[in-house]
Image (spheres, rainbow, N blue to C red):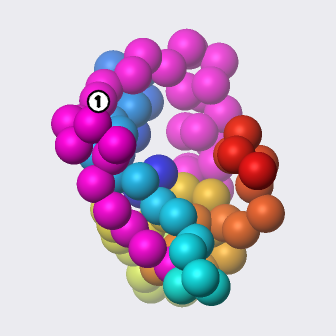
Amino acid sequence: MQVGDIDVDQGVLHIGFNYVVAGGRRVRKDTKTHQDRYLAIDPVTCAMIRDHLDAIRAELRGLGLKLPEDAYVFSNDRWAPARGIPTGHA
């Protein structure tokens, strides 16, 4: 999930791709159905995500930087999602 995929004002999450680790390689690929999806996000989750992004933006602003729209929301590395998050798959 990248910053540009979330609209916390409208409560919408855009799902446009799948991210997997295959053979030790990070792979970004099409969704299983090859179709984008838009999911509703409840107000509490929107508030949590907004607070999270606001905190990151404030820290970056102090360094003279901006949070890019293609940065992953939950990541230790701007180019890859956080690892170790359960996905429901074995």
Instruction: Examine the image and state in which quarter residue 84 appears.
Output: bottom right
**Residue 48 sits above or below residue 82 on the image:** above
Quadrant for residue 25, please give it: bottom right
Q: Nearer the viewer, residue 33 or 86?
A: 33
Above or below for 31 versus 77: above
Residue at x 38% of width, y 68% of height? 28
Relative image position of residue 44 (x, y in whole percent): 65, 18
| Residue 64 on image: x %, y % | 44, 84
| Residue marked by disc 1 | 37
In terms of depth relative to the viewer, which is nearer, 11 or 62?
11
Q: Is residue 62 visible?
A: no
Image quarter of residue 70: bottom left
- Indicate whether 48 appears above or below 1: above
Is 57 left, or right, of 14 in this rendering? right
Judge whether 65 appears above or below 69 on screen: below
Residue in the image at 66% along x and 33% along y:
48
Look at 55% across and 27% down and name the residue there. Answer: 46
Magenta run includes residue 41: yes
Q: Which residue occupies the foreground of this view, 71 or 90?
A: 90
Does residue 8 appear to the left or right of 43 in the view shown?
Answer: left
Q: Is residue 2 left or right of residue 16?
A: right
Callout 1 environment at 10 Å: few (<14), some (14 to 19), or many (20+)? few
Magenta-drawn segment: 26-55
* Label 1 residue SS: strand
Residue 80 seen in the current view: yes
Q: Report the residue at 39% width, 22% height from top.
A: 39
- Residue 54: horizontal and vertical position, in percent? 56, 51
